[in-house]
């Protein structure tokens, strides 16, 4: 007799209250997790507007005086405008090369059967196992001999080469889930393999390509080692190289360093927010068949 039934749901009112309470606890835990995850980013932007004295004396508190001129000074001292342009050129060119070659190779490996297919799959898998930075010395020697040092190509070609294995495996795993009947119907209608690739497979694999593009963008944009070794001209320095302008062997200007880092991280945040839906689709592609 004490049990009250909700007129809207048909379930006991106590059960509805428990459901609301559980949802509140889950939302609170997720909000706490989001705050912990975002706090390093919040701390970065707070530190970018502090003086060096406050950076040491109040590292986890809001600045007493918001030094907005740190952003302007960091931009001028580091030559951030030129660095952003160079990083943009290198990143976009590397992504285009990676996506085009990766999509073509993935199409062949996922839609065709031939004798050397296991060999090529193993070769690309081996490429994923090679530590990237262990190749710096031989790559430097090769770049010097072919005259590519201090050019955009010195970064674009290695970036694309080392990102290709991941691109091929991600896109190939997605293309395998596409029914072959679509391809067979296109062949019957007279469409060639190039037409199938560009008109059908490439648009259908957009989620996987978006995932590869985001992962590649983060790797190319943030790389420091290759740019440090292969680029010595100030006119070609990328964003990671420009960030090192505030550190010497004796001291580091943290207020300008943090301001420059805040500028450098903004493009990655914007790109992720714009393509986050495609990233999730690409990461879950092929997980469920049926």
Image: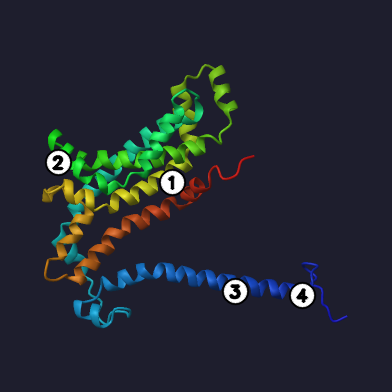
Residue at left offset 83%, top offset 78%: 3
Quarter of the figure that contains the C terminus: top right
Nearest to viewer (mark 2 / mark 4): 2
The kind of secondary structure element at disc 1 is: helix
- Is 269 on the left-hand or right-hand side of 282? left
> What is the quadrant of residue 48 in the picture?
bottom left
- Is 65 on the left-hand or right-hand side of 126? left
The kind of secondary structure element at disc 4 is: helix
The kind of secondary structure element at disc 2 is: loop
Disc 3 crowd rating (10 Å Cα; few below 14, some 14-19, many 20+) is few
Residue 84 visible (yes or no): no
Residue at left offset 79%, top offset 73%: 12
Q: Which mark is residue 25?
A: 3
The location of residue 281, given as percent across then percent down, is 51, 47
Residue 209 visible (yes or no): yes
Which residue is tagged 4? 13
The location of residue 234, given as percent across then percent down, is 11, 51
Disc on the earlier residue, 4 or 3: 4
Residue at left offset 33%, top offset 72%: 43
Which residue is tagged 2? 149
Disc on the earlier residue, 2 or 4: 4
Which residue is tagged 1? 211
Q: Mark 3 and mark 1: span between their CA atoms?
A: 32 Å
Nearest to viewer (mark 4 / mark 1): 1
């Amino acid at each position: 007799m004490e049990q009250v039934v909700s007129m809207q749901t048909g379930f006991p009112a106590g059960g509805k209250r428990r459901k609301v309470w559980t949802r509140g606890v889950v939302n609170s835990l997720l909000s706490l997790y989001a705050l912990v995850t975002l706090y390093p980013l919040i701390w970065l932007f707070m530190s970018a507007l502090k003086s060096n004295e406050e950076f040491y004396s109040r590292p986890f508190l809001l600045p007493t005086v918001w030094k907005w001129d740190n952003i302007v000074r960091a931009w001028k001292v580091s030559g951030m405008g030129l660095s952003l342009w160079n990083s943009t050129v290198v990143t976009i060119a590397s992504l285009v090369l990676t996506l085009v070659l990766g999509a073509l190779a993935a199409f062949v490996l996922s839609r065709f059967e031939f004798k050397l297919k296991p060999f090529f799959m193993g070769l690309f898998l081996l490429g994923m196992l090679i530590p990237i930075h262990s190749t710096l010395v031989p790559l430097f020697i090769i770049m010097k001999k072919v005259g590519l040092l201090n050019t955009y190509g010195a970064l674009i070609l290695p970036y694309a080469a080392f990102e290709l294995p991941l691109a091929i495996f991600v896109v190939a795993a997605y293309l395998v889930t596409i029914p072959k009947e679509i391809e067979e119907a296109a062949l019957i209608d007279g469409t060639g393999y190039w037409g199938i690739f560009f008109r059908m497979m490439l648009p259908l694999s957009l989620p996987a390509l978006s995932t590869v593009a985001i992962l590649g963008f983060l790797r190319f944009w943030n790389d420091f080692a290759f740019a440090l070794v292969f680029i010595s001209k100030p006119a070609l320095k990328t964003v990671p190289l420009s960030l090192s302008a505030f550190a010497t062997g004796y001291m580091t200007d943290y207020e300008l360093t943090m301001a420059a880092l805040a500028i450098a991280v903004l493009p990655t945040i914007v790109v992720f927010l714009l393509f986050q839906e495609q990233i999730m689709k690409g990461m879950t592609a092929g997980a469920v068949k049926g």
